[in-house]
Image (tube, helix red, strand yellow):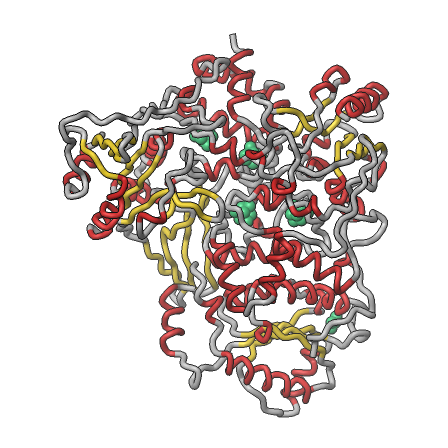
């Protein structure tokens, strides 16, 4: 697979179809994969692809990373779940389809508990998104690297995140509030969640607007609750559940829960799932006169 | 002062004794899957199974957010009230040698020119009890930056584990001595035979890294524009997790919170990795791309700190490497610079 | 926003004497006009509501609602033109989508949704406005002060 990837990268760079390959390489100790930017054909052998390649590299296609945009036309190594974010970026007018070469990777899953990685994929070390993945064969690509993968995700999504959502839904508001208070109190306002998310591409985040200061930047409960609610809300109908925010959070806050809750809400209410079709407008910028709810008096 | 001993089983007694004296006891606990420093009530909350907590204990000398003044808007004008800080005594148990060395670094910044009493008053009342490392991981590199698990710099009391489930305690500072005296009921002198100490684990110094070479290379101003910076660090997406978990990072922002009628002025952690950190009111931003922000972080640790202060900028705790979502490894940059520097 | 204030509120407000503060975010063209009509028609209703007028429900950022709770509101009411009647054609349809998501998020975080109410009220529905305010006030009064937010450490 790596061989085919490198060959494709070499070809793209040599023909000038792409100026930079955004992919993965080993760190010095060869214990972790880390993002790589390859501009020369003779460096393509640095490229790797394996279950340690967790990063959603679509972050580097956004205007938050201007110096990378300046490197020229990118070809991006992307798993199906990463492509979902590219799809949203295209549908929101952030990236033009023709401005990026998508090298789709067939993928059997990635590893989150990387300390436990012994060279073999096991369900326990894979994130929930992989167990429910319907894009192991990447969906929007210029090229696909790797063999076709036969995998059917469960009809109703399963896993810890979904169990936990159901469990929380069954509780009283008071119990849910204590749960989230505890979670959000740990927030240290580093904004890693925002920086990791390719869909948080605003150059000036609402939390940086200080006349007036809409969201208190202090890492106290009040400021943390406001931040976390607004972050989740700004991703409503857009979040693809790639999990980068939660993975990046140094405080281990269960951001996947809020994100997935809104994914489910949007699915129920508007029959929409983000990340599949770049030609459809995201649900929060359109409407249907037939939208129904049961709470407006 | 001679070495004293403390039974692991009697940590609970130490905690009560500390609490009876009115001080807070802070130690490593497991919280949401991370080992972090937290104020604790009893010994059962403590964990011994950690390399180094993911968070630092600097939050007890330099809190994430703290009120430095309050204001009220009245018809006559604005009433401003300062805060006369009277911090509690804090005992930090289970620190590591690398991190202990960082308090001196923080102090040099917060006493540079003017004393920042919000820092100094807190630091004056903190007692650091370090436990020598008997386990390490790939990311530890204290020995590469001239420290080691055996360093006592910055610790008030230094503990070594013994094979019979005790700690051997050595007071490093007057504060440490006073602490042992104050809690003499918990510490005891050893019986006839010298106890056997659990061996310290030292990370292998990274061969390719030479601190002098890094300093020499950074001293050459043209290297500020080196192609190395974007090449090695453009993958950083500015999440700031490294800065917020670094024991020597010290940047803060002053912000006002409140309503039209009053509120408070706060000192909050800030990070040079944030894109608005150096944004000017005019809209100009001298560090307009992420690699320039990362370069600043590196320069801060390996040039600005050593140039301005005698203290060290990076203590090699490896936290920034472990926490980085793109796995930007500061030692890889150190190594490459050491290699290209002649 | 000082600590003392909060404590005072806690100490003095028992359920009997408690008068909730309710923030209403309303659109200029329908609900505000409806409230105005209630006023000019000298209809009486509970004095607990503070109105903020916005051009359209489409302008109501969920952040306003969070801000209202942060600043001590015990309940929030959001109201605008009936579907189809928006002065800007579709502002309220967009708002509705947003509310569906936001309300679900608030519910999931454990905020009692009885404290966050939505309605459509036209310029001629002064009576509906009066009834709504009275009912919402009673409901929130019964719930007591919104301590979840007031107790947040700042
Ligand atoms: S990454 Fe985590 S700690 Fe940082 S701002 Fe986001 S939620 Fe808070
Ligand atoms: S909010 Fe989190 S899970 Fe959703 S797209 Fe952004 S990084 Fe991915
Ligand atoms: S720069 Fe990294 S390794 Fe050095 S002290 Fe800070 S967190 Fe630790
Ligand atoms: S933790 Fe990594 S990605 Fe985040 S600011 Fe630091 S170096 Fe950049
Ligand atoms: S103008 Fe009333 S909802 Fe748009």
In depth, the one of A9 and A1 nearer the eye is A1
Looking at the rendered image, the quarter that the C terminus of chain A falls into is bottom right
Q: Residue A148: x and y, percent?
A: 83, 36
Q: Residue C110: x and y, percent?
A: 55, 66
Q: Residue A61: x and y, percent?
A: 73, 37
Residue farthest along the top direction in this orientation: B342
Residue at figure coordinates x 68%, y 89% from the top left: C127
Q: Give the number of marks.
A: 0
> Is residue C102 among the parts visible in the rendering?
yes
> Is residue B104 among the parts visible in the rendering?
no
Q: Residue B175: x and y, percent?
A: 20, 36
In depth, the one of C94 and B332 nearer the eye is B332
Please state if B28 lies on the left or on the right of C58 as rendered: left
Residue at figure coordinates x 52%, y 25% from the top left: B330
In depth, the one of B304 and A287 nearer the eye is A287
Identify the image quadrant of residue B287: top right
Task: In the rendered view, tell whether residue B304 sits above or below residue C82.
Answer: above
Looking at the rendered image, the quarter that the N terminus of chain A falls into is top right
Residue at figure coordinates x 50%, y 51% from the top left: A217
Task: In the rendered view, tell whether residue C82 sits above or below residue B263.
Answer: below
Please state if C99 lies on the left or on the right of A18 as rendered: left
Please state if C143 lies on the left or on the right of B11 as rendered: right
Quadrant of picture, ligand 5: bottom right
Residue at figure coordinates x 40%, y 66% from the top left: B74
Identify the image quadrant of residue A59: top right
Task: In the rendered view, tell whether residue A55 sits above or below residue B31.
Answer: above
């Amino acid at each position: 697979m790596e061989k085919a990837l490198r060959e494709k990268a070499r070809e793209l760079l040599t023909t000038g179809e792409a100026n930079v390959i955004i992919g993965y390489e080993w760190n010095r100790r060869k214990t972790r994969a880390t993002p790589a930017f390859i501009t020369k054909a003779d460096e393509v052998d640095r490229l790797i692809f394996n279950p340690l390649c967790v990063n959603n590299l679509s972050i580097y296609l956004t205007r938050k990373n201007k110096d990378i945009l300046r490197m020229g036309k990118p070809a991006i190594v992307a798993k199906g779940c990463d492509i979902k974010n590219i799809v949203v970026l295209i549908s929101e007018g952030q990236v033009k389809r023709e401005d990026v070469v998508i090298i789709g990777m067939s993928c059997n899953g990635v590893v989150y508990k990387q300390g436990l990685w012994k060279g073999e994929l096991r369900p326990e070390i894979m994130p929930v998104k992989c167990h429910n993945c319907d894009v192991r064969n990447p969906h929007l690509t210029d090229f696909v690297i790797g063999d076709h993968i036969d995998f059917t995700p469960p009809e109703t999504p399963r896993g810890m995140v979904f169990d936990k959502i159901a469990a929380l839904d069954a509780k009283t508001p008071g119990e849910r509030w204590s749960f989230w208070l505890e979670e959000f109190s740990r927030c240290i306002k580093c904004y890693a969640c925002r920086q990791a998310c390719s869909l948080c591409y605003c150059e000036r985040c609402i939390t940086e607007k200080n006349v007036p200061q809409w969201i208190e930047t202090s890492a106290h409960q009040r400021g943390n609750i406001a931040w976390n609610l607004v972050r989740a809300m700004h991703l409503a109908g857009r979040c693809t559940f790639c999990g980068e925010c939660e993975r990046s959070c140094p405080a281990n806050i269960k951001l996947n829960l809020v994100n997935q809750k809104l994914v489910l809400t949007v699915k129920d209410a508007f029959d929409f799932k983000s990340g599949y079709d770049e030609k459809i407008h995201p649900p929060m910028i359109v409407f249907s006169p037939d939208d129904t709810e049961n709470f407006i008096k | 002062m001679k070495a004293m001993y403390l039974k692991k089983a009697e940590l609970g007694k130490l905690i009560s004794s500390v609490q009876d004296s009115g001080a807070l006891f802070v130690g490593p606990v497991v919280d949401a899957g991370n080992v972090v420093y937290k104020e604790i009530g009893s010994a059962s909350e403590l964990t011994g199974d950690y390399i180094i907590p993911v968070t630092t204990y600097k939050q007890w000398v330099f809190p994430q957010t703290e009120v430095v003044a309050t204001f009220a808007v009245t018809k006559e004008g604005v009433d401003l009230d300062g805060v006369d800080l009277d911090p509690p005594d804090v005992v930090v148990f289970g620190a590591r040698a690398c991190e202990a060395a960082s308090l001196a670094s923080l102090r040099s910044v917060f006493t540079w020119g003017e004393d920042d009493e919000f820092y100094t008053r807190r630091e004056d009342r903190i007692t650091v009890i370090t436990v020598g490392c008997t386990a390490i991981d790939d990311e530890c590199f204290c020995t590469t930056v001239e420290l080691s698990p055996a360093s006592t710099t910055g610790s008030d009391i230094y503990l070594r584990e013994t094979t019979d489930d005790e700690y051997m305690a050595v007071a490093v500072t007057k504060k440490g001595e006073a602490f042992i005296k104050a809690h003499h009921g918990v510490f005891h002198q050893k019986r006839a035979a010298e106890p056997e100490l659990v061996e310290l684990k030292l990370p292998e110094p990274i061969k390719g890294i030479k601190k002098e070479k890094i300093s020499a290379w950074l001293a050459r101003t043209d290297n500020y524009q080196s192609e190395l910076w974007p090449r090695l660090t453009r993958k950083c997406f500015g999440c700031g997790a490294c800065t917020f978990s670094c024991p020597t990072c010290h940047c803060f922002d002053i912000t006002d919170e409140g309503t039209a009628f009053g509120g408070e002025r706060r000192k909050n952690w800030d990070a040079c990795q944030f894109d608005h950190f150096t944004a000017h009111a005019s809209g100009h931003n001298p560090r307009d791309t992420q690699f320039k922000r990362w370069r600043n972080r590196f320069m801060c640790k390996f040039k600005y700190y050593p140039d301005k202060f005698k203290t060290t900028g990076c203590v090699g705790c490896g936290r920034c490497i472990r926490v980085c979502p793109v796995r930007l490894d500061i030692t890889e940059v150190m190594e490459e610079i050491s290699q290209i520097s002649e | 926003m000082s600590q003392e204030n909060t404590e005072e509120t806690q100490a003095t407000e028992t359920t009997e004497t408690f008068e909730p503060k309710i923030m209403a975010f309303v659109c200029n063209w329908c609900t505000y006009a409806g409230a105005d009509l209630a006023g000019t028609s000298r209809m009486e209703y509970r004095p607990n509501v503070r109105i903020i007028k916005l051009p359209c429900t489409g302008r109501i950022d969920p952040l306003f609602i969070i801000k209202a709770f942060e600043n001590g509101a015990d309940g929030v009411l959001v109201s605008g033109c009936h579907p189809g009647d928006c002065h800007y054609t579709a502002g309220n349809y967009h708002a509705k989508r947003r509310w569906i998501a936001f309300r679900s998020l608030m519910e999931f975080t454990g905020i009692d949704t009885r404290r966050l109410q939505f309605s459509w009220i036209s310029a001629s529905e002064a009576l509906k406005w009066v009834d709504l305010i009275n009912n919402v006030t009673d409901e929130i009064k019964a719930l007591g002060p919104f301590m979840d937010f007031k107790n947040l450490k700042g």
